[in-house]
Image: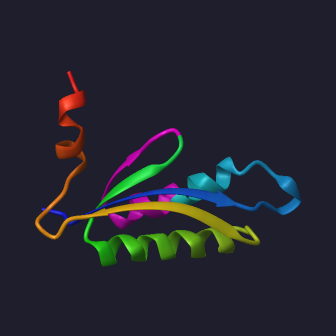
Amino acid sequence: MANTLLSIQVIPKTPNNEDSIPYVDTAIEVIQRSGVKHQVNPLETTMEGELTELLEVVRQMHEALVEAGSPSVISQIKIAHNPSGISMEKLTEKYRP
C-alpha cells in the first residue's frame, strides 16, 4: 500500500500572457507517463504512491513546464503521509454511493 497522497495545483507563468491550460495539460501528461495512481480534479490532481517517487514526479513536472516555455512555475502542494499506508479510496469511501 502507498504511504503518501500528494495533491498538486500548478500555476505556470505563460509567455505573453497565453492561456495556461496547455501548460497544465503538459504537467498532467508527466503524471500520466509516470505510472503513479492519480486522479485529475477541476482544481488539482492527486497522486498516490511513495513520498520520494511523488516528489520526483513534481520535479519532472516543473522541468517539463519550463521546457515548454513557462518562465516560472508556482505549485501548491498538499501531502498526506502515513508510513502504515494511505489511499484515495480509503479516505473518500464514505462519500461514495
Write the start and end of the magenta stretch as one range.
Answer: 28-42
Q: Is residue 90 left or right of residue 46?
A: left
Q: How did the renderer colour the structure? A: rainbow
- Tell me residue 76's x, y (percent): 54, 60
Magenta stretch: includes residue 79: no
Vertical placement of residue 3 versus 59, above or below: above
Q: How many marks?
A: 0
- Along the viewing direction, whichever of 20 and 95 lies nearer the viewer: 95
Which image quadrant is residue 66 in?
Answer: bottom right
- Tell me residue 4's x, y (percent): 27, 64
- Tell me residue 3's x, y (percent): 20, 66
Residue at (66%, 48%) from the top-left corner?
21
Seen from this angle, which residue lies furthest top? 97
The N terminus is located in which quarter? Answer: bottom left
Vertical placement of residue 21 versus 48, above or below: above
Vertical placement of residue 97 versus 46, above or below: above
Q: Is residue 85 left or right of residue 55?
A: left
Which image quadrant is residue 24 in?
Answer: bottom right
Q: Is residue 62 left or right of residue 70?
A: left
